[in-house]
């Protein structure tokens, strides 16, 4: 947890990613006071507290949550659920303003990424559960970047749009695109998005995987796939997920599944590709059934496709390499070293945050300890918990009430997304927003698409703002937006969280303020002409497809992608035109 004083406001950043662990990575550039300093962290809570004034900074240690960051505890010291976590944070804030009374009346903005999409709403929920005179601080707003807000199939619902953004993943193959599009429809993931949203709340989406008797199992990740190294691997992104599926269900799937990795070993990808397509009713069209092996885990199927059939992913020397879910264009193998242990164990770091100096702090990202929920070692396999061992309902179950409460105090809600993120896609974010009622209307009334710019005047992404809710898409950023684009993230905080940049708002005349970006396709900015970066331990080269291949794809996708799951009452643009 990082706390920053910024002129007349206070920021608490809870910087997370979806997996649990204890390592933190420094940002790619340093800022200077009074500019906020951000860290990208592999932790549920970054336990370093940083107070930045107009001229100087000092660091104070605090503990949220036990089991992550610089923390130790016995077996009974872990939070059981999100509500207890939220109450603990309220207690922390009470202590904070006791020590620093000036913070009590400053607007407090809570920022975070990934699993903070669940932490932050629960913190705000517990804040509003208190009577106004018992609230320890003045909440100014919340901001969630690439946030996990749902436990259902919405995490897989954006894979077709991920392909539209980076068709490199499927080697620009129209038949494969059509297959994934059909699977999206069969799984019920082609939710119709309209502006304004029509038809009331969305139905609960089918989980990517099912057990016999329609009982859900872990979705998206399982304990064996929590580590970054195992999350990016060669053979099959789904294989180890099936360990928890009953034998009879697994046997049924095995009748249909074809072990494509055998052809990898024989360098016979062409034969494997032909057989893969034949099993799924291709070429021409799909066979009209949900794939019995992958079911609706379109993420795992897409990763498997890339690591078996598409260079450079299929030819990486590291057997654990594959598609980087945090940054699609990154195909380095192995990745550049990002071990933060030397910094974390530097006596100056440990001493500055008052952590125990007798401990050797090391990364436990993806280890067998799935903290912080009840010290749940078997996260995802405990009944009535999600894949991270979290028993609390998804954030989406109370977002409408939360957004309403924030509006009553004239607070801000900011949701942001990296264009190159494969874990939480932009479509996933749009689905979440359009399923929330705020200001008396469900979702945005106009389609996002207004350009925003960095301090240097360069195009930075897309923004839309209505009724106290702001959506920001970052160009050239993956899951860790603050790390990939620190300068633009600073602009984002300065102008959209602390400031009042009106780009993307609806003016008194009913028109959007700012320039509509004509490359925006409703969800993403196309990356079909972007290079895929390669190298061993560093970026040493890139892969770019022939212009003829890209041109043919763009001609195909203009009509192939148009009707799926989107209606708008606003003007639309050809996404291949220039701004």
Image (spheres, grey):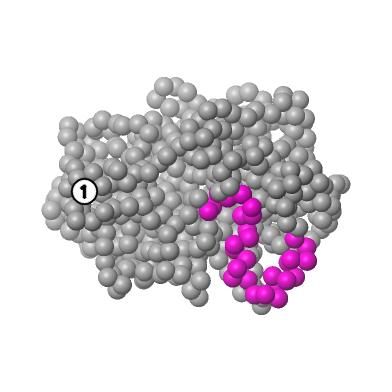
Q: Position of residue 222 (x, y in %)?
A: 53, 62
Residue lying at 60% horizontally and 40% vertically, measured from the top left: 316
On the rendered image, what quadrant is the C terminus found in?
top right
Q: Position of residue 45 (x, y in %)?
A: 34, 54
Whether the magenta-drawn stretch holds residue 90 is answered as no
Residue lying at 63% horizontally and 23% vertically, measured from the top left: 578
Q: Position of residue 496 (x, y in %)?
A: 39, 37
SS under mark 1? helix
Single out the residue that lies furthest toward the front.
266
Left or right position of 251 against 382? right
Residue 47 appears in the rendering = yes
Highlighted magenta segment, given as a residue range? 230-257
Q: Which residue is mark 1?
A: 350
Q: Position of residue 246 (x, y in %)?
A: 64, 75
Q: Is residue 118 above or below residue 273?
A: below
Whether the magenta-drawn stretch holds residue 247 is answered as yes
Residue in the foreground of this view, choosing between 577 and 147: 147
């Amino acid at each position: 947890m990082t706390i920053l004083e910024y002129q007349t406001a206070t920021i608490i950043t809870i910087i997370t990613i979806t997996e649990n662990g204890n390592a933190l990575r420094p940002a790619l550039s340093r800022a200077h006071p009074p500019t906020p300093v951000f860290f990208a962290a592999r932790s549920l809570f970054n336990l370093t507290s940083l107070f930045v004034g107009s001229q100087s900074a000092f660091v104070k240690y605090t503990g949220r949550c036990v089991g992550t960051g610089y923390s130790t505890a016995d077996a009974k010291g872990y939070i059981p659920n999100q509500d207890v976590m939220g109450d603990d944070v309220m207690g922390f804030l009470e202590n904070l303003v006791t020590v620093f009374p000036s913070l009590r009346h400053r607007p407090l903005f809570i920022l975070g990424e990934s699993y903070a999409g669940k932490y932050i709403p629960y913190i705000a929920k517990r804040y509003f559960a208190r009577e106004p005179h018992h609230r320890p601080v003045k909440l100014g707003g919340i901001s969630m970047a690439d946030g996990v807000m749902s436990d259902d199939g919405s995490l897989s619902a954006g894979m077709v749009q991920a392909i539209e953004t980076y068709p490199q993943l499927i080697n620009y193959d129209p038949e494969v695109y059509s297959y994934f599009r059909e699977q999206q429809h069969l799984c019920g993931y082609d939710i119709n998005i309209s502006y304004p949203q029509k038809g009331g709340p969305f139905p609960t989406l089918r989980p990517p995987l099912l057990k016999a008797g329609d009982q859900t199992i872990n979705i998206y990740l399982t304990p064996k796939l929590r580590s970054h190294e195992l999350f990016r691997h060669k053979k099959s992104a789904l294989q180890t997920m099936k360990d928890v599926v009953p034998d009879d269900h697994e046997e049924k799937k095995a009748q249909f599944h074809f072990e494509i990795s055998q052809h990898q070993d024989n360098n016979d990808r062409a034969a494997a590709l032909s057989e893969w397509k034949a099993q799924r009713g291709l070429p021409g069209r799909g066979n009209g059934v949900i794939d019995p092996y992958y079911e609706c885990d379109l993420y795992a199927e897409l990763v498997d496709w890339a690591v078996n059939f598409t260079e450079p992913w299929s030819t990486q020397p590291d057997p654990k390499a594959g598609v980087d879910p945090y940054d699609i264009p990154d195909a380095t193998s192995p990745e550049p070293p990002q071990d933060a242990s030397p910094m974390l164990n530097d006596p100056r770091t440990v001493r500055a945050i008052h952590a125990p100096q007798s401990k050797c702090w090391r990364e436990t990202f993806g280890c067998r300890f799935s903290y912080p929920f009840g010290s749940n070692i078997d996260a995802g396999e405990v009944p009535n918990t999600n894949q991270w061992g979290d028993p609390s309902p998804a954030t989406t179950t109370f977002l409408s009430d939360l957004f309403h409460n924030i509006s009553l105090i004239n607070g801000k809600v900011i949701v942001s997304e990296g264009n190159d993120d494969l874990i939480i896609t932009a479509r996933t974010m749009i689905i979440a927003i359009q399923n929330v009622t705020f200001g008396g209307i469900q979702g945005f009334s106009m389609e996002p698409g207004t350009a925003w710019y960095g301090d240097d005047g360069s195009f930075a992404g897309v923004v839309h703002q209505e009724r106290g809710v702001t959506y920001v898409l970052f160009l050239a950023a993956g899951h860790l937006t603050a790390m990939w684009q620190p300068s633009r993230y600073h602009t984002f905080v300065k102008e959209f969280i602390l400031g009042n940049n009106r780009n993307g708002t609806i003016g008194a005349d009913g028109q959007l303020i700012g320039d509509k970006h004509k490359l925006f396709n409703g969800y993403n900015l196309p990356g079909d002409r972007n290079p895929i970066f390669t190298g061993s331990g560093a970026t040493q080269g890139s892969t770019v497809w022939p212009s003829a291949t890209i041109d043919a794809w763009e001609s195909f996708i203009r009509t192939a992608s148009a009707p799926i799951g989107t209606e708008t009452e606003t003007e639309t643009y050809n996404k291949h035109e220039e701004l």
